[in-house]
Image (cartoon, grey):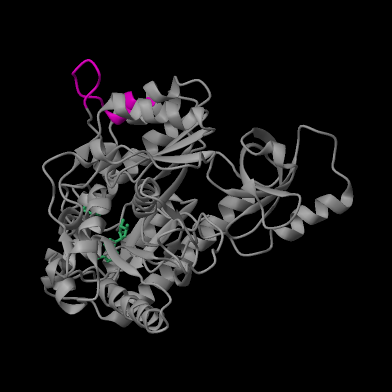
Amino acid sequence: MPHMTQSPEGELGRHHAERAAATTEPSTLPKKLHIKTYGCQMNVYDSERMAGLLARHGYTQVSDAAAADLVVLNTCHIREKAAEKVYSELGRLRVMRDERRAAGDGDLRLVVAGCVAQAEGAAMLERAPFVDIVVGPQTYHRLPELLARRERAAGGQLDTDFPLESKFDLLPESAGQSPISAFLTIQEGCDKFCTFCVVPYTRGAEESRPGAAILAEARRLVAGGAREITLLGQNVNAYHGQGPEGRSWSLARLIRELAAIDGLDRLRYTTSHPRDMDEELILAHGQVPALMPFLHLPVQSGSDRVLQAMNRGYSARDFERVVDRLREVRPDIALSSDFITGFPGESDAEFEATIDLVRRVGFAQAFSFKYSPRPGTPGAVMPRQVEESVRGERLARLQTLLEAQAADFNARTVGLTLPVLFERPGRHPGQLVGRTPYLQAVHVTASAESIGTIRPVEIAAAFPHSLAGRLADQPPVADPLTRGALGAAHGPAQPEETFA
Ligand code: 5AD
Ligand code: SF4
């Protein structure tokens, strides 16, 4: 479960393989790849696809950069000083490489991918000439070719242009694993140009994948064991991919098609824009049982003037109307959102409007951020920038309220019996972790055969970022086991999910 107060600083390491021994003879052993992923779920997904692509060229993943022949930093540009952090990480890797070379202990290739690569471009190769490859989000599929060229070339390789061909056609499916809960990118890029956001510049124009390709990938994921699919896109509910019959499909239409796939029990989508929550999509929440009652719908602010300055295209009232309609068709829907405090020009009263909106709407979970001026965005040069200290104070107040709402939401599920999809073993023996329809992580004492099944779980206790429960479809579990399940859930939430 994401931490409610997580800032865009949150960083997601994604390691599938065990730590491997250092390679002494790279030519005879499989090559070792380490990917460090920063930022949003889209980046996590891109990292998986890069790993899949490189697996075809003999790379296996290792969890430790020190054991790798190739390190990819998949970067995120949303947060402040993102580029500086990448440069300092590169500095550390360079030292490691130099030591390795001096000891005659092999070599290390360094690749920078993602949005910082896109934004920095050639400047990165100038400032960090020891980097081998800089590759933008649109050109990952060329990584093997760039690596091969790198073996022959003297200088670093740069490929951050938006390609003419669709990257969807060229990337292989993500490799190997078939997680119970899988991600599937259906849309990329954004044309909305919110005045604080770099995405339209780094990820490019909005592009939707054709419906048939998505259905085919979903069927493959289900055949591989997935029971839940989360549809991903920077602006996922703006989806307008071509349907097989040639007409454009909306997200609602796509969801209905996906829901018909046998064995696909749960569907989610993220991240949505309030402007694109049309009636057809809202109705799907009331009519498609597989569509889970949880929605991440970033509102950013509760002040109409600030929303306008942000170029969001809706008012606070518009947002609340969407929420009201959603609750009419699906009364138990849990809402999540993103907020920014201290956008340029935000007055005390305008910030209070955000607090008021949060009180009126009520959120099960949320992400909130201090406004961070991103170079190249209109917000960065707006007059009346808000003092850092004020941005911080407002953030702290907002987070206190949002945390209380999240704790209250979790507490209200105690005593309920909810269907839980078991995804993986917990950190303690005999314990599994699953999710409720409301995306809450639940720790339950259950045997590994339950992984991949949906079973009723009585929620026994709530913690800030997770729940503990017991299986409700079998006789009560002996006391010591029950205590094990509850005790184990006291640990910190596993920070493995975040939303764009
Ligand atoms: N400053 C602060 N927060 C930002 N976000 C995006 N850009 C900025 C920025 N410049 C937040 C928004 C968005 C989430 C992914 O990150 O709330 O919804
Ligand atoms: Fe697009 Fe979302 Fe960024 Fe706005 S905040 S420009 S909708 S990605």
Q: Is residue 446 above or below residue 267?
A: below
Q: Locate residue 130, reporting x and y percent.
A: 24, 76
Q: Looking at the image, is 13 positioned above or below residue 311?
A: below
Main secondary-structure element of the magenta-colored stretch? loop
Residue 280, can we see it? no
Q: Residue at x 30, y 68 (%)?
A: 79
Q: Residue at x 44, y 24 (%)?
A: 259
Query: In terms of depth relative to the viewer, which is nearer, 111 or 212?
Result: 111
**Depth check, front residue: 194 or 331:** 194
| 375 to the left or right of 24 | left
- Over which residues does the magenta segment extend? 242-255
Where residue 80 appears, as percent x and y from the top left, is: 28, 72
**Rendering quarter of residue 491:** bottom right
Whole-percent x, y for residue 318 in the image: 27, 43
Seen from the viewer's position, the closer of residues 230 and 449 is: 449
Within the magenta stretch, is there residue 245? yes
